[in-house]
Image (spheres, rainbow, N blue to C red):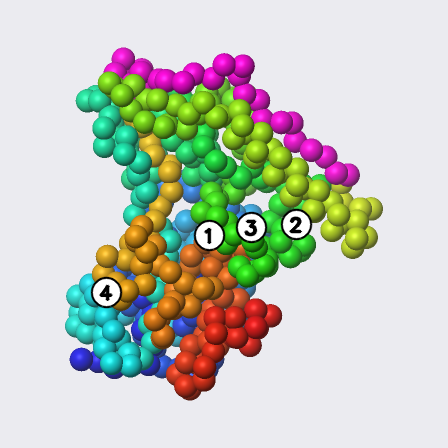
């Protein structure tokens, strides 16, 4: 059995950020990756996907994007190359093609069992990410014959779909991008809309992520919100990264011919039953959008930027037809495919440590689990609003590596006592 001080599970952006921070502290460690570096970025993504954040925002500890298009949005091959290049630059000790099959407590540390032997470590960092397996609703397994049920993670390009109508369930970033691409391929598309966070690609002449970054909105801490569990369950921004910096939302999709309906609430006799709350869901998203833009405008005025950027404006409210349908027959041949863009959940089936709740979600306070020496990275709003972004990994890794170092030194530390502004 091999030994090390820390095992990091996952060599994506979160695991690599933690590796760099541990190296800076001279803490020996190994990263265990089931595939190659950036495995999850190279699998489970469709061909045309680009990052939703501009390239300048791909900041990792000691490393920034230095390419020719900082305001563009990296393609998946570019993201993979960026992360693998970072792994090389920081000389990350990655064991590739090594799948973890068990993590269990052993004395004052852990035993991590893999397909390539076992490791004993005093601390473990779970950096395998929040997108382990698709979160599929019950109707996904109940579709009538002749209608293909597909998780968004299985989708690659329109050519893999049968000719005919496509129902997409979910209208966050993934849902709207697939609706746009598949509709442009000539297939009729119906988009079933649940809760979403409406966000323009640009505002007042600047990328929306520039505003959220500059105004400090993305730096809001997990201990500064009233209900962090609710915030962690919010859908992702309704954003698309395109060379044209286009805003694609429910209005632009409808203008192109995509139909929007309420979320899929169930299935009965081959008919998709739809929620009647579409109008209220869209009104709430519009209201939250206005609040966000109000906060940006206030920050711009306070910092004297009003004369340097475009004047404030507000997008048109989301259009909803007077009487949205409450059901869609799926057995008529009109709908050939249903794509479930309903989110993901972590996959911790190999974690033999009592830190999971009844839904299989890991319990933690800012990435610090109840079991000493076990940490988690890459989860929604882990320590800040930006935690799931590449850009968020640096600050989270800095905080948690400080906490981890204190644990190794026998210093009694709480989840917020990390030597950072969270302390």
Q: Does the residue at mark 4 contact the one at mark 1 (Cβ under 8 Å)?
A: no
Q: Residue at x 41, y 72 (%)?
A: 19
As for residue 351 lying within the magenta part, the answer is no
Q: Locate the C terminus and report the quarter of the image it occupies.
A: bottom right
Residue 283 versus residue 206: which sits nearer the camera? 283
Q: Residue at x 34, y 49 (%)?
A: 345
Labels 3 and 2: the sequence-earlier one = 3
- The residue to which callout 1 is attached is 229
| Position of residue 50 measured from the top left corner of the image (x, y, whole percent) | 46, 45
The residue lying at 42 percent from left, 86 percent from top is: 409
Q: Earlier in the sequence, mark 1 or mark 2?
A: 2
Task: Kindly state the secondary structure of the residue where label 1 is placed.
Answer: helix
Residues under labels 2 and 4: Cα distance?
Answer: 42 Å
Viewer-nearest of discs 1 and 2 = 1
Image position of 7 (left or right of 2): right
Dot 4 lies on which element? strand
Instruction: Give coordinates of residue 335: x percent, y percent.
Output: 31, 19
Quadrant where the image shows the N terminus: bottom left
Image depth: mark 4 or mark 3 in front: 4
Give the residue at mark 3.
Answer: 54
- The residue closer to the viewer here, 233 or 191, is 233
Which of marks 3 and 1 precedes in the sequence? 3
Query: Magenta segment, which residues?
Result: 311-336
The local crowd at label 3, few if under 14, some if 14 to 19, many if 20 or more residues have their Cα within 10 Å, is many
Report x, y in % for residue 96: 27, 66
């Amino acid at each position: 059995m091999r030994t090390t001080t820390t095992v990091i599970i996952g060599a994506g952006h979160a695991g690599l950020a933690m590796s760099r921070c541990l190296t800076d502290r001279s803490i020996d460690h190994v990263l265990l990756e089931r595939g190659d570096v950036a495995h999850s970025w190279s699998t489970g993504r469709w061909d045309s996907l680009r990052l939703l954040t501009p390239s300048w925002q791909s900041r990792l500890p000691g490393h920034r994007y230095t390419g020719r298009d900082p305001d563009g949005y990296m393609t998946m091959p570019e993201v993979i190359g960026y992360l693998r290049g970072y792994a090389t630059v920081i000389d990350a000790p990655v064991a590739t093609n090594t799948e973890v099959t068990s993590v269990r407590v052993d004395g004052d540390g852990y035993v991590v069992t893999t397909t390539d032997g076992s490791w004993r470590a005093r601390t473990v960092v779970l950096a395998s990410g929040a997108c382990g397996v698709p979160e599929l609703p019950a109707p996904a397994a109940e579709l009538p014959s002749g209608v293909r049920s597909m998780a968004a993670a299985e989708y690659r390009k329109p050519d893999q779909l049968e000719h005919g109508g496509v129902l997409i369930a979910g209208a966050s970033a993934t849902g709207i991008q697939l609706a746009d691409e598949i509709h442009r391929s000539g297939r009729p598309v119906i988009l079933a809309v649940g809760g979403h966070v409406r966000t323009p690609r640009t505002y007042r002449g600047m990328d929306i992520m520039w505003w959220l970054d500059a105004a400090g909105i993305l730096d809001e801490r997990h201990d500064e919100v009233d209900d962090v569990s609710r915030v962690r369950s919010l859908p992702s921004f309704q954003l698309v990264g395109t060379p044209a910096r286009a805003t694609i939302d429910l209005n632009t999709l409808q203008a192109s011919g995509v139909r929007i309906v309420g979320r899929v609430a169930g299935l009965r006799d081959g008919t998709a039953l739809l929620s009647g709350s579409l109008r209220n869901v869209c009104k709430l998203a519009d209201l939250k959008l206005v609040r966000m833009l109000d906060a940006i405008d206030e920050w711009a005025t306070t910092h004297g930027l009003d004369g340097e950027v475009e004047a404030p404006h507000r997008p048109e409210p989301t259009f909803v037809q007077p009487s949205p349908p409450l059901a869609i027959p799926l057995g008529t041949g009109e709908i050939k495919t249903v794509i479930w863009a309903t989110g993901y959940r972590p996959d911790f089936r190999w974690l033999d440590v009592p830190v999971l709740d009844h839904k299989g979600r890991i319990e933690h306070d800012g990435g610090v689990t109840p079991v000493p020496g076990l940490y988690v990275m890459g989860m929604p709003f882990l320590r800040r609003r930006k935690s799931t972004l590449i850009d968020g990994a640096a600050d989270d890794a800095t905080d948690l590596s400080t906490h981890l170092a204190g644990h190794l030194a026998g210093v009694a530390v709480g989840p917020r006592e990390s030597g950072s502004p969270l302390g």
